[in-house]
Image (cartoon, coloured by chain):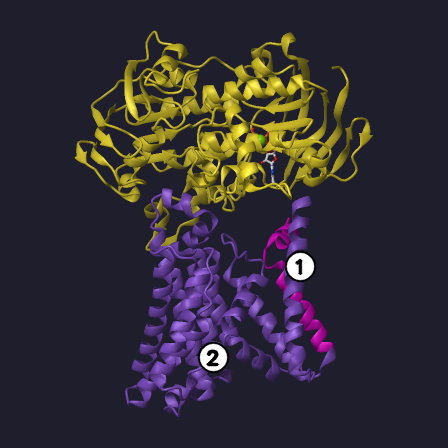
Chain colours: A purple, B yellow
C-alpha cells in the first residue's frame, strides 16, 4: 500500500531523478558530498526554489507567468534606488516587495478580469516591466548598499547562509498555504474546471488575482536575495529566469493545463536543477554543454513521470 | 443476418482498486442493434473503449469478421469500419459544426464549401436547421450530441458504437436518431447501443446483453424478455416499487415575475415550500435559461426574482447560493465537476464558509461531510479521495447532487438531473428528491424526460420557445398531453 502511494505521488519522477543524480555525482566528484558544497547547492538553489514556488501557484490554475524576470528587475532597481536615496533598508525592502506584488496584481487583473490568455499578458508585461526598470534606472546598474541589506544575500546565521534560511521560510509558508488554505484549494480547483468552480459561487477572479500576486511576491523575495548577493541591481532582466522556474515546476509532473501539481514537486525540481548546475561546475563541464545537459535532464524527468503515470494506471 | 461480425471473448480489465471487466464476452451480428445494459459503473463504457482502442485490455481476445485484432487503436478501428460515439462529448467548441463533423477525415482536395454542403445534407436528416458554420460552443447540449452522432455516422462505419447517445436529447431528436439507425440497419451496418432508457432499448434493439459489476449477466433476444427481468438482472435483486410523493406544501419561496431575456419571454413562476415543480420543455425551449437567471449566471434580464419574499433580482451566483439556491447543471463535465479533483473536494466545493476556518481547511470536516452525503446518494465508492473523472457517468451525477444536498440548499434547481443515470440509480435519485422535499425544501426539475417529471412533480409548467404555455397539476395527465403543449407554440412538430 505504502509502495503504491509513493509511486502514485506526482513528485516520484523528479525525486528519482534527483536521487539518481545525487548518487552519480558523489561517485564522480569527491568534493560533491562535502558539507560546504551541499550548503553551496542550497545557496545557489534558494532563488530558484522561491521562484518556482510562486510559479506553481500560477501554473496549477492553468496559467503561466513569463514576466518574473522583469518583475525581479523592477523590484531590485526600486529597492536599490530607494536605498541610494538614504531611506532605511526595511522600507526599501517593503517597497520592493510591494512593487513586485503590484506587478503580479497587474498580471492577475489582466488575466482574470479582462480574460486575456496568461501567456500573452505576461509576454507583454515582461516587456513593459523591463522598460519601466530601464527608464527608472536610466539603463545603469545601481550598486553599493548598506551592510544590513547585503547581509540578506551574503550573511549567515549559525553558519547557514541567510538566503537558505529565507528559502526555508518560504517553503514552510507556501506548503502550508498550498495544502491547508483556501488559496491552494481553489487554485487547484480553478485549474481543473474553472466553469464548475464559478458555478459553485467561488470568486474565481479573486483567487486568480491572489495567485499572480503570490507569484509577484515570491519574485520580490528572490529579487532581494539576488540584489543583495551581487551588491548591485541590474536593469537588464534575465529572460530565462521565468522559464527556469516553469521548468522546475513541470518537471515534477505538474501539468501546464492546470488542476494538478504541488509546491513540494517544484522544490524538488529546483533542487534537481541546482545539483545539476553545481555538479557540472565541479566537473568543469563547459557552459555550452551545460545548457544542453539541463534540457536533456528536464526531458528525462518528464519522461519518468509519464512512465509512472501509465504504470500506476495498470495495477 | 445471423453472421457474427464482432466477437469479444473473456475480456478483463483492472483499474487501480477496481476490477472493471471480468471475463466479459460479447458478440455482435451483422445488421443488428445490440443493446448493452448495466448499472452505472458496470463497465459498459470501458468495454466499448477497449473495442475501439481507447483503453488497453489486460487479457482476452477480440475478433473482427473471425480474424483476431491484435493491436487496436482508434485510427485502426476507423480503418476497420468501427466508429464510437463516446459518452463524454468531444466536440471542439471553437470549431464549426462542419469542421467537427469532418474532424480527422477532412478530405484533402475538397473545399470547405463542399464540407459544409455535405454537413448540411446530414443535418437535414436530423432536422437541424442552422448553418453548418455555427461554432459548436453556441449549440445546446442536445445539438452538440447530435453533431457527435453525425460525426460518427459520417465515418460510414459498419460497426457503430453508441455510448448513451440520447443523453440530453429530446423526444424528437431521439426519434430522428432511431430513423437513422434503422436506415443504417437496412444497409447491413451493426450498432452497439448503450442507454439507460428502457423504452428506447425495447424500441430499437434486437438483442440485449446485460453487464453487472463487470461480469456478463445474460444475453437475450429483445422479444423474449421483459423490462422487469432486465432491471432485476442489472441490479442483481428485485427492486421495490416507488412511493408517491406526498408532503405538505407551504408558502411561496420563489417567485419569478415577468422574466425576459434574449431567449425567454415573460416567464412567471412560483415555487412553494415542499413542492417539486417540473419544467417540461424541449431542448432549446428556454429551461436552462430560466435557471441561469435565477442562479445569477446570466444577469442580463428584465423582470424580478423573489426568494422568500426578498427581492433577489440580478443576484450573483454566490448571492444566490447564500439565499439557499443550488443548481445541478445539464452538463456535468463542462460546468459541474472538477474532474481531476477528488470526490470530497467536489462535494464540498461550494462550502467555502463551512470547510475553512480563518482560511484554513478543515480536512476532517471535508471528509465527514462528503462521506455522509456520498453514502446518502448511494455512490459506488466510499473512497473520498477517488478522482471524480474516473467515476462512471452516473456516479459523477450523484456527486453533483450530493454537493447540493450537503450544502443544505433550500431551493434546488435540477437541469436534466438523471441524464446518464441507470434505472435503479434514477429511482434512488427520485427518492432523494422526494425525501429532500419533505416539507422544508423545494425543487424545480427541468427535463425533456417527461415520464420523469410525471413521476416526481407536484405541478408541471410547460414551456415552449421561451414562453410558458401551460401550467398543470400533476393529476390525470400523461406524456402525450405534455408533449402536445410542449410542441404547441409553433415549436417543433413530431
Ligand atoms: N480511468 C479509470 N481509473 C479508475 N477507475 C476507472 C477508470 N475508468 C473507469 N473506472 C471504473 O471502472 C468501472 C466501470 O466504469 P464504466 O465507465 O465502464 O461504467 P459504465 O458501465 O459505462 O457506467 P455509466 O452507465 O455510469 O456510464 C467503474 O467502477 C469506474 O469507476
Ligand atoms: Mg458509461
**Residue A315 at least partly seen:** no
Q: Position of residue A68 (x, y in %)?
A: 44, 71
Q: Which mark is residue A163?
A: 2
Q: In the rendered structure, does residue A12 fall within the stretch colored magenta?
A: yes
Q: Which mark is residue A79?
A: none
Q: Establish if B293 lies above or below B479.
A: below
Pointer 1 local density, CA inside 10 Å: few below 14, some 14–19, many at least 20: some
Q: Position of residue A218 (x, y in %)?
A: 42, 70
Q: What chain does badge 1 belong to?
A: A
Q: What chain does badge 2 belong to?
A: A
SS at circle 1: helix
Q: In the rendered structure, does residue A131 fall within the stretch colored magenta?
A: no
Can you tell me which quadrant of the image ligand 2 is in? top right
Q: Which residue is mark 1?
A: A303
- Choose top left, top right, bottom left or bottom right for residue B412: top left
Q: Looking at mark 2, is its residue's CB closer than 8 Å to ligand 1?
A: no
Q: Quadrant of the C terminus of chain B?
A: top left
Q: Establish if A152 lies above or below B340.
A: below
Cα separation between marks 2 and 1: 32 Å
Q: Is residue B377 left or right of residue B11?
A: left
Q: Which of the two marks, 2 or 1, is nearer to us in this view?
A: 1
Q: Establish if B174 lies above or below B45.
A: above
Question: Magenta region's main secondary structure?
Answer: helix
- Choose top left, top right, bottom left or bottom right for residue B26: top right
Which stretch did the figure color magenta?
A: A1-27
Q: Residue furthest bottom?
A: A144
Residue shown at the point (41%, 22%) measured from the top left: B448
SS at circle 2: helix
Query: Viewer-proximal residue, B368 or B486?
Result: B486
**Residue A17 at least partly seen:** yes
Q: Looking at mark 1, is its residue's CB closer than 8 Å to ligand 1?
A: no
Q: Position of residue B270 (x, y in %)?
A: 23, 24
Amino acid at each position: 500500500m505504502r509502495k503504491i502511494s509513493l509511486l502514485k505521488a506526482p513528485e516520484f519522477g523528479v525525486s528519482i531523478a534527483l536521487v539518481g543524480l545525487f548518487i552519480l555525482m558523489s561517485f564522480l566528484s569527491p568534493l560533491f558530498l562535502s558539507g560546504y558544497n551541499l550548503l553551496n547547492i542550497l545557496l545557489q538553489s534558494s532563488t530558484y526554489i522561491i521562484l518556482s514556488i510562486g510559479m506553481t501557484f500560477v501554473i496549477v490554475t492553468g496559467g503561466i507567468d513569463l514576466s518574473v524576470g522583469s518583475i525581479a528587475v523592477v523590484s531590485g532597481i526600486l529597492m536599490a534606488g530607494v536605498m541610494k536615496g538614504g531611506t532605511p533598508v526595511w522600507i526599501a525592502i517593503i517597497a520592493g516587495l510591494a512593487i513586485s506584488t503590484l506587478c503580479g496584481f497587474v498580471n492577475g487583473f489582466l488575466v482574470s478580469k479582462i480574460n486575456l490568455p496568461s501567456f500573452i499578458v505576461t509576454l507583454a508585461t515582461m516587456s513593459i516591466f523591463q522598460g519601466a526598470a530601464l527608464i527608472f534606472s536610466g539603463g545603469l546598474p545601481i550598486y553599493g548598499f548598506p551592510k544590513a541589506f547585503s547581509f540578506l544575500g551574503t550573511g549567515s546565521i549559525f553558519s547557514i547562509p541567510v538566503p537558505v534560511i529565507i528559502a526555508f521560510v518560504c517553503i514552510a509558508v507556501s506548503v502550508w498555504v498550498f495544502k491547508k488554505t483556501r488559496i491552494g484549494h481553489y487554485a487547484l480547483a480553478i485549474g481543473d474546471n474553472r466553469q464548475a468552480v464559478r458555478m459553485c459561487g467561488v470568486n474565481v477572479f479573486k483567487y486568480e488575482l491572489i495567485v499572480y500576486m503570490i507569484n509577484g511576491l515570491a519574485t520580490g523575495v528572490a529579487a532581494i536575495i539576488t540584489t543583495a548577493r551581487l551588491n548591485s541591481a541590474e536593469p537588464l532582466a534575465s529572460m530565462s529566469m521565468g522559464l527556469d522556474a516553469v521548468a522546475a515546476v513541470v518537471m515534477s509532473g505538474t501539468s501546464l493545463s492546470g488542476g494538478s501539481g504541488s509546491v513540494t514537486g517544484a522544490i524538488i525540481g529546483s533542487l534537481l536543477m541546482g545539483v545539476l548546475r553545481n555538479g557540472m561546475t565541479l566537473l568543469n563541464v563547459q557552459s555550452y554543454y551545460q545548457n544542453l545537459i539541463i534540457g536533456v535532464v528536464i526531458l528525462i524527468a518528464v519522461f519518468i513521470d509519464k512512465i509512472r503515470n501509465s504504470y500506476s494506471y495498470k495495477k | 443476418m445471423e453472421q457474427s461480425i464482432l466477437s469479444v471473448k473473456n475480456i478483463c480489465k483492472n483499474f487501480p482498486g477496481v476490477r472493471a471487466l471480468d471475463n466479459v464476452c460479447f458478440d455482435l451480428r451483422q445488421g443488428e442493434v445490440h443493446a448493452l445494459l448495466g448499472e452505472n459503473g458496470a463497465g459498459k463504457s470501458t468495454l466499448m473503449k477497449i473495442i475501439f482502442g481507447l483503453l488497453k485490455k489486460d487479457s482476452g481476445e477480440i475478433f473482427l469478421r473471425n480474424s483476431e485484432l491484435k493491436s487496436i487503436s482508434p485510427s485502426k478501428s476507423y480503418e476497420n469500419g468501427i466508429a464510437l460515439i463516446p459518452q463524454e462529448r468531444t466536440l471542439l467548441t471553437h470549431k464549426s459544426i462542419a469542421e467537427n463533423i469532418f474532424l480527422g477525415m477532412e478530405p484533402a482536395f475538397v473545399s470547405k464549401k463542399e464540407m459544409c454542403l455535405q454537413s448540411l445534407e446530414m443535418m437535414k436528416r436530423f432536422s437541424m436547421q442552422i448553418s453548418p458554420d455555427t461554432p459548436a460552443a453556441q449549440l445546446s447540449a442536445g445539438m452538440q450530441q447530435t453533431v457527435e452522432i453525425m460525426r460518427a455516422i459520417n465515418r460510414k462505419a459498419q460497426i457503430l458504437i453508441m455510448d448513451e447517445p440520447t443523453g440530453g436529447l429530446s423526444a424528437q431528436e431521439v426519434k430522428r436518431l432511431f430513423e437513422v439507425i434503422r436506415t443504417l440497419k437496412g444497409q447491413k451496418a451493426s450498432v452497439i447501443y448503450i442507454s439507460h432508457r428502457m423504452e428506447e432499448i425495447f424500441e430499437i434493439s434486437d438483442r440485449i446483453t446485460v453487464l453487472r459489476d463487470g461480469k456478463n449477466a445474460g444475453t437475450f433476444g429483445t422479444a423474449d424478455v421483459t423490462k422487469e427481468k432486465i432491471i432485476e438482472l442489472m441490479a442483481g435483486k428485485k427492486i421495490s416499487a416507488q412511493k408517491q410523493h406526498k408532503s405538505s406544501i407551504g408558502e411561496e419561496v420563489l417567485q419569478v415575475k415577468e422574466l425576459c431575456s434574449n431567449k425567454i419571454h415573460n416567464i412567471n413562476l412560483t415555487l412553494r415550500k415542499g413542492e417539486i415543480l417540473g419544467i417540461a420543455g424541449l431542448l432549446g425551449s428556454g429551461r436552462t435559461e430560466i435557471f441561469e437567471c435565477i442562479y445569477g449566471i446570466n444577469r442580463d434580464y428584465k423582470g424580478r426574482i423573489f426568494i422568500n419574499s426578498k427581492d433577489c433580482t440580478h443576484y450573483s451566483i454566490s448571492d444566490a447560493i447564500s439565499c439557499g439556491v443550488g443548481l445541478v447543471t445539464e452538463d456535468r463535465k463542462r460546468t459541474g465537476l472538477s474532474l481531476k479533483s477528488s470526490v470530497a473536494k467536489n462535494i464540498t466545493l461550494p462550502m467555502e464558509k463551512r470547510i475553512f476556518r480563518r482560511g484554513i481547511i478543515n480536512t476532517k470536516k471535508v471528509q465527514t461531510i462528503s462521506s455522509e452525503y456520498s453514502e446518502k446518494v448511494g455512490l459506488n465508492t466510499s473512497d473520498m479521495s477517488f478522482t471524480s473523472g474516473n467515476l462512471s457517468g452516473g456516479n459523477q451525477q450523484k456527486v453533483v447532487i450530493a454537493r447540493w444536498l450537503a450544502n443544505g440548499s433550500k431551493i434546488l434547481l435540477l437541469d436534466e438531473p438523471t441524464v446518464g443515470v441507470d434505472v435503479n440509480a434514477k429511482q434512488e435519485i427520485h427518492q432523494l428528491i422526494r425525501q429532500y422535499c419533505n416539507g422544508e425544501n423545494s425543487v424545480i426539475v427541468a427535463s425533456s424526460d417527461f415520464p420523469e417529471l410525471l413521476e416526481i412533480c407536484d405541478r408541471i409548467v410547460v414551456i415552449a420557445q421561451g414562453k410558458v404555455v401551460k401550467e398543470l397539476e400533476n393529476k390525470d395527465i400523461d406524456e402525450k398531453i405534455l408533449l402536445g403543449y410542449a410542441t404547441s407554440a409553433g415549436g417543433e412538430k413530431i
